Image: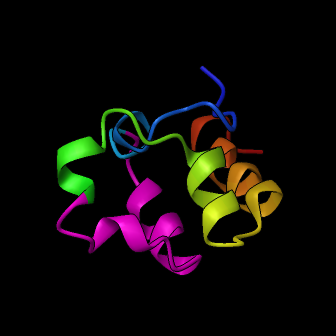
């Protein structure tokens, strides 16, 4: 598995340590009460775009969790 801009937040949160990475980049969905209703459909790329987050760095760190170097 590789995390891409199309990976949903719910899929990412199944990875150990992923929540810490998302918190580091201030992903607002983790604390948003409304996100809980749509987290299955929220793609990391869309969220990063909406909140002007550094998607490239987020994906890099998340993918390191899957395949550490």
Q: Residue furthest right?
A: 56
Q: Position of residue 55 (x, y in %)?
A: 74, 57
In the rendered structure, the answer to whether residue 68 lies left or right of residue 30 reads right
In the rendered structure, the answer to whether residue 14 lies left or right of residue 46 reads left
Q: Say which quadrant the C terminus sits in.
A: top right
* First to last magenta residue range: 15-34
Q: Say which quadrant the N terminus sits in.
A: top right
Q: Nearer the viewer, residue 4 or 34?
A: 34
Residue 36 painted magenta: no
Q: Is residue 20 above or below residue 38?
A: below
Q: Position of residue 61 (x, y in %)?
A: 69, 57
Q: Is residue 26 above or below residue 46?
A: below
Which residue is drawn at the image coordinates 34% and 39% (left, top)?
A: 10
Which residue is drawn at the image coordinates 71% and 72% (left, top)?
A: 52
Q: Is residue 5 above or below residue 22?
A: above
Q: Is residue 63 above or below residue 23?
A: above
In the rendered structure, the answer to whether residue 52 lies left or right of residue 51 reads right
> So how many labels did they put on this image?
0
Q: Position of residue 59 (x, y in %)?
A: 71, 49
Which residue is drawn at the image coordinates 45% and 54% (left, top)?
A: 18
Q: Nearer the viewer, residue 49 or 7?
A: 49
Q: Residue furthest top?
A: 1
């Amino acid at each position: 598995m590789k995390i891409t801009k199309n990976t949903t937040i719910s899929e990412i949160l199944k990875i150990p340590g992923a929540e810490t990475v998302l918190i580091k980049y201030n992903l607002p969905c983790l604390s948003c009460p409304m996100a809980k209703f749509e987290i299955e459909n929220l793609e990391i790329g869309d969220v990063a775009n909406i909140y002007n987050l550094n998607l490239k760095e987020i994906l890099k760190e998340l993918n390191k969790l899957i395949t550490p170097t």
